[in-house]
Image: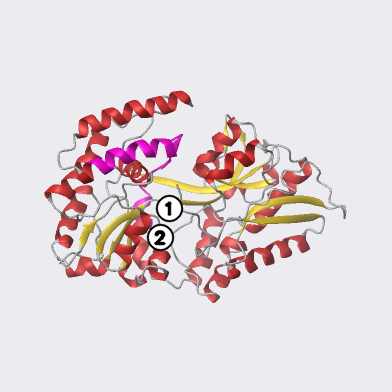
Amino acid sequence: MRSTGFRRTFVMLMASSVALTATACGSSDDDAANGKTRVTVNCEPPKSAKVDRSFFDADIAAFEKANPDIDVVAHDAFPCQDPKTFDAKLAGGQMEDVFYTYFTDARHVVDVNQAADITSYVKDLKSYSTIQQQLRDIYTVDGKIYGIPRTGYSMGLIYNKALFKKAGLDPDKPPATWEELRADAKKIAALGEGTVGYADYSAQNQGGWHFTAELYSQGGNVVAEDGKSATVDTPEGKAVLQNLKDMRWSDNSMGSKQLLVINDVQQMMGSGKLGMYLSAPDNIPILVKEKGGNYNDLGLAPMPGGKGTLIGGDGYMFNKKDSPAQIKAGLKWLDSMFLTPGDGFLGDYARAKQNKAPVGLPEPRLFTGAADDKDQQVKKANANVPVENYQAFLDGNQSLQMKIEPPQAQQIYSVLDAAVSAVLTKKDADIDQLLKDASGKIDSILARG
């Protein structure tokens, strides 16, 4: 899932209705009427997002000027990928030449034979070797490359520094373990006046998503390495549910209102009534711009537990109908648009700052080595948020194992939703039985493929 529930751009302010354009998609004809190589792409910001749209179009115009033999035709949409129409577009041959995907889509698109193998072409992508290996691996299936990562995120813990201080806690020392989180949540909830120490999602598949992140933090996995069986009915899985149950019913630190989703929790944090919740950095500007929060009050820490965290993100894949010329042109466009450190639609931090978009959040972090150094240098020079509030997250992430979402993620999350919601709404919930039931259902999902 996306960490915000939708997708992110460098301004993180996208909002509009979906506009899916089927014409001129997935064409194998790489020559436009003017003799140029023509490629259709998606994920153009909608017209209602005027600033994003103007930057996206300006960047395409600059690219076409630098590459007069290429014609880029952009299609707008929000979200960039609509789960309700994605498979239909794939099956109907209506996908763009270069199309947006979540990390969890990569293998599926390959399995249904709708992706072009670009292995022999990535040598021409200047930035490819600078992208984090674990992100590149997501689009590598059976040794062949089918896509290029664009952004990545990892889950952490957002906490309210003001409430920490008010509760007598050190606002510069967020909890590093689940035991510490439980103790801190109890002290924050004791402030009263509707204050909640810790909140978690438990509906619309979001509870299953967070269960997965919490399981990773305990050192566990949702699915075995061979992808054929569930691994949730384990001591680590039990620890996740037991911790939630104890905080909810023994400590009363999670509040009485449950079956929460992302918007509910964001509203609680933005209004200053919530101490902590799990999230990625891109939630922070939403909390400030949409929910009434303050950048100075919002700290970010790594996942408690110290063993692992969930990562996600997005990238672009290539239509199986693409010609070699279209693949080469599409890779050039990706390099210019998204993969040049400190420049392009996602990396022009000076432009973002001028338009009052948040600059200085610790993610997305796509590059390694000198490319990462340059990207971070430009970001730091244009930072307009309190970067010191996120240092714990940066430091702690270095020792965590980064794990992608499980296969058949949404179906599995639906199953795990039931387990999470049960322990948060039923005081007598049987954790062992919940995990046993969930394991059997997940096994069936995996067996169906």
Vertical placement of residue 372 versus 141, above or below: below
Q: Residue 3 carries which label?
A: 1
Q: Answer with left or right where residue 5 lies relative to residue 348.
A: left
Residue marked by disc 2: 283
Q: Is residue 52 visible?
A: yes
The answer to whether 61 is drawn above or below residue 198 in the figure is: below
In three-dimensional space, the C-alpha distance between marks 1 and 2, rounded to whole angstroms, equals: 7 Å
* Left or right, residue 217 beside residue 51: left
Q: Give the range drawn in magenta.
A: 394-422
Task: Give the residue at x 22% y 29%.
Answer: 433
Let me know if residue 401 is in the magenta part: yes
Badge 1: few (under 14), some or many (20 or more) residues near its Cα, within 10 Å? many
For disc 2, the neighbor class at 10 Å (few under 14, some 14 to 19, many from 20) is some
Amino acid type of the residue tagged 1 in the rendering: Ser
- Residue at (73% x, 49% y) in the render: 23
Establish if 125 lies above or below 285: above
- The answer to which quarter of the image holds residue 268 is bottom left
Look at label 2 and name its amino acid.
Asn
Task: Report the side of 61 relative to 4 (left or right).
Answer: right
